[in-house]
Amino acid sequence: MTINFSSNFAKNIQNDAKRNDIRETVSALCVAAKQISHICARGPLESGLGDTTGGANSDGDAQKALDVRSDEIVTAALETAPVAYYASEEQDDVVTLDARKPLAVASDPLDGSSNIDTNVSIGTIFSIFTANEDALSSFLRAGSEQICGGFFVYGPQTTLVITAGDGTETYVLDPDTGDFELAIANMKITAASTEYAINASNHHHWEPPVRAYMEDCLAGADGPLGEKYNMRWVGSLVADANRILSRGGLFMYPGDDREGYQAGRLRILYEANPVAFVIEQAGGLATDGTQRIMDLSVDSLHQRVPFVFGSKKPVQMVADYHDEK
Ligand code: AFP
């Protein structure tokens, strides 16, 4: 046993067999997360974690050693679970594990690669669907079809933030027992917040609505928004998302005019959709600036999407700035 599920977890999944399939798959992901967490905890004692392997993922990002190792660990764990197909940031195409099995899992096995060598929180993101006959169509579908989603954070604690469509929960890997224990049930994000997360170094590449909103935030209490704003940017989506779940806030990775960044940097299948699922289930909002992320069509495995999420009020305000454009 690796995780002590709450009595609430997946209780809305009427079909016992599917509920058990989800539990088995999440348990397998917990086994993988424990291994990755252990490697992260050893850090520089595990030489070369942040070294590039010479390979690149489908997006052209240089693959780091821990990216590839995490992908191998997640794949091996899912081979023990009721999972037919696996789609990963580190694999160009869908991997068929066993086409007879009922589920499909998409993952960013190691989120926040740029922070690997800096002892800053990184993580693993996952999204679970019911498998279709065909491998690819099991993933080219709207995020609203997810049956479970979440992410692990490898930080001061190793945590799991997860939803199966009936609220968002946080589990902590208890170093004394080696099991994931429920720590926070039914998480709720504050509706209002004056804290934002964006990579401000891209300011001059932003579209006018994003630039206008950010400049009004920076204008502070004497500005049009009449409040002092604060900023945080970790460079690991899982860490920024976890902070926003904990104390509210706004995250933005908008599209911009850099080569290849017209649709932002984050991938809709295994980064934006699972994070949007946990954020919405905790009472927040998640959009591409205007549209609900989980309503958007997914036309390719590594499709990028502008991503705005967090407390309802600021996310809605960003949409208003786009409407006023
Ligand atoms: P990966 O290293 O897994 O691609 O994750 C990094 C990331 O996708 C996400 O975790 C961060 O929020 C974002 O990129 C950081 O982007 P910048 O390096 O442009 O700030």
Image (spheres, rainbow, N blue to C red):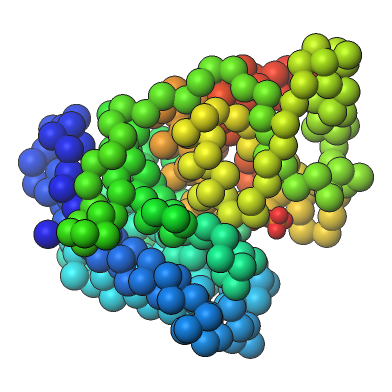
Q: Which residue appears at 63% of the width and 46% of the height?
A: 305
Residue at 28 percent of width and 55 percent of height: 173
Q: Is the C terminus in the top left, top right, bottom left or bottom right quadrant?
A: top right
Residue 209 image position (x, y, % from top left):
82, 28
Q: Where residue 101 sits: x, y (%)? A: 18, 62
Q: Where is residue 250 drawn, in percent x and y?
A: 63, 31
Name the quadrant containing residue 312.
top right
Instruction: Specify whether residue 51 is in view.
Output: yes
**Residue ID at (68%, 41%):** 232
Residue occupying the point 71% across, 49% down: 264
Residue 217 in percent (x, y) is at 80, 25
Against 44, is 120 above or below? above
Report whether residue 319 is seen. no
Give the total of numbered labels: 0
Image quarter in which the N terminus is found: bottom left
Q: Is residue 157 left or right of residue 306?
A: left
Residue 25, by quadrant, is bottom left
- Asked if residue 38 is positioned above or below residue 200 in the image, the reply reads below
Ligand 1 resides in the quarter of the picture at bottom right
